[in-house]
Image (spheres, rainbow, N blue to C red):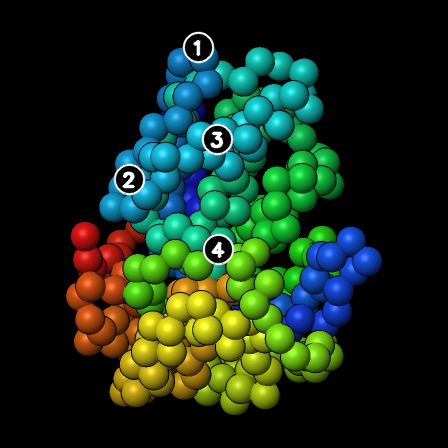
């Protein structure tokens, strides 16, 4: 049971709202990648299932009666026909309700960690089905690697070949609930993006992604005007190749030629913001390190 399970931040490099189903759920097209920033989850032996919250952002979840991590644990145990047990420790480093899939990544990490610790060996397809019951972003967070996500999150396909690239994440420390942003959205639907098989370098990827958009950005700014301030600040940073909001916000990202440039640029941003600079990652993840300014 020893060791931490990483729950990396999910970044929507673009997000097109392509339609809406009869049941009200929106259809999306998005290229998702994962940053080196993230939460971490650990399981320790114990009888009854419990969850302890730690980390710089842990206090923001203290009032939640049923964290997604606990829901994931109970769902997996129920599917396996075993009692849920163990003391889970969630090191919360990502801001809550911020458009980078923190809760979904935590739930996915719980499924991976507990399936291994409990010796279940659940088939990937079955684990993905459980993930979908927890939320639209949880399936893509299970593998935490660059993926194209469509439908309501259930259609996953290979991403274009991603080059080495730096990424900076910044959030004005204001939560922005996803349902409210979708309700505030106005305008037509956007066709799915046309993507190449890959990009030679970060600059080529940024030029290609500039032809796409985040269809929730305008709605998010109407509800949370500081998002526009963050976007302007990112776009003005030296070396920035592209600035855009991730998911339903309020976290925004900027692409840079390399991880070092992104890390240096993060230090320029206001200390009151949550910010992180580094690179994209695929498992296994490095130890978490962030510039998480503000109290």
- Say left or right for 187 vs 162: right
Point out the tag, 2 or 1, that comes first from the N-terminus: 1
Residue to which mark 4 is pinned: 177
Mark 1 or mark 4: whose residue is earlier in sequence? 1
Distance in Å between CA atoms under marks 2 and 1: 25 Å
**For the residues bearing labels 3 and 2, Cβ distance under 8 angstroms:** no
Mark 2 and mark 1 residues within 8 Å of each other at the beta carbon:
no
Q: In the image, which disc is placed on residue 66? A: 3
Give the Cα distance between marks 4 and 3.
17 Å
Q: Are marks 4 and 2 in contact (CB under 8 Å)?
A: no
Q: Residue at point 71% right, 53% down?
A: 154
**Front disc: 4 or 3:** 4
Along the line of sight, the residue nearer the viewer: 68 or 164 = 68
Q: Position of residue 186 (x, y in %)?
A: 62, 75
Circle 2 packing at 10 Å, graded few (<14), some (14-19), many (20+), is few
**Mark 1 lies on residue:** 47
Circles 4 and 3, Cβ within 8 Å, touching? The answer is no
Q: Nearer the viewer, mark 2 or mark 1?
A: 2
Query: Which quarter shows the N terminus?
Result: top left
Residue that appears at 67% across and 16% down: 81
Q: Which mark is residue 111?
A: none
Q: Position of residue 281 (x, y in %)?
A: 44, 60
Going by the image, does 83 lie left or right of 79? Answer: left
| Residue 284: percent from left, percent from top | 45, 49
Residue 111 in percent (x, y) is at 56, 35
**Label 4 vs 2, first from the N-terminus:** 2
For label 2, the residue is 59
Among numbered discs 3 and 2, the one appearing first in the sequence: 2
């Amino acid at each position: 049971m020893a060791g931490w399970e990483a729950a990396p931040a999910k970044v929507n490099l673009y997000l097109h709202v392509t339609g809406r189903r009869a049941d009200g759920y929106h259809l999306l097209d998005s290229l998702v990648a994962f940053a080196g920033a993230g939460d971490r989850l650990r399981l320790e032996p114990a009888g009854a299932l419990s969850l302890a919250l730690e980390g710089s952002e842990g206090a923001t979840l203290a009032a939640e009666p049923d964290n997604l991590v606990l829901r994931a644990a109970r769902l997996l145990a129920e599917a396996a026909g075993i009692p849920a047990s163990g003391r889970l420790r969630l090191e919360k480093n990502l801001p809550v309700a911020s458009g980078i899939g923190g809760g979904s990544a935590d739930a996915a990490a719980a499924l991976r960690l507990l399936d291994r610790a409990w010796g279940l060996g659940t088939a990937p397809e079955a684990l993905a089905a459980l993930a979908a019951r927890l939320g639209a972003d949880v399936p893509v967070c299970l593998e935490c690697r660059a993926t194209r996500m469509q439908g309501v999150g259930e259609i996953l396909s290979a991403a274009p070949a991603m080059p080495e690239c730096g990424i900076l994440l910044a959030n004005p420390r204001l939560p922005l609930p996803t349902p409210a942003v979708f309700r505030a959205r106005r305008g037509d639907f956007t066709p799915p993006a046309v993507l190449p098989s890959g990009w030679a370098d970060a600059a080529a990827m940024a030029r290609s992604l500039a032809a796409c958009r985040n269809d929730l950005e305008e709605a998010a700014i109407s509800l949370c005007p500081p998002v526009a301030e963050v976007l302007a600040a990112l776009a003005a940073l030296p070396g920035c190749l592209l600035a855009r909001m991730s998911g339903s916000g309020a976290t925004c990202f900027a692409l840079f030629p390399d991880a070092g440039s992104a890390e240096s640029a993060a230090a320029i941003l206001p200390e009151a913001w949550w910010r992180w600079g580094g690179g994209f990652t695929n498992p296994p993840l490095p130890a978490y390190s962030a510039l998480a300014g503000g109290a």
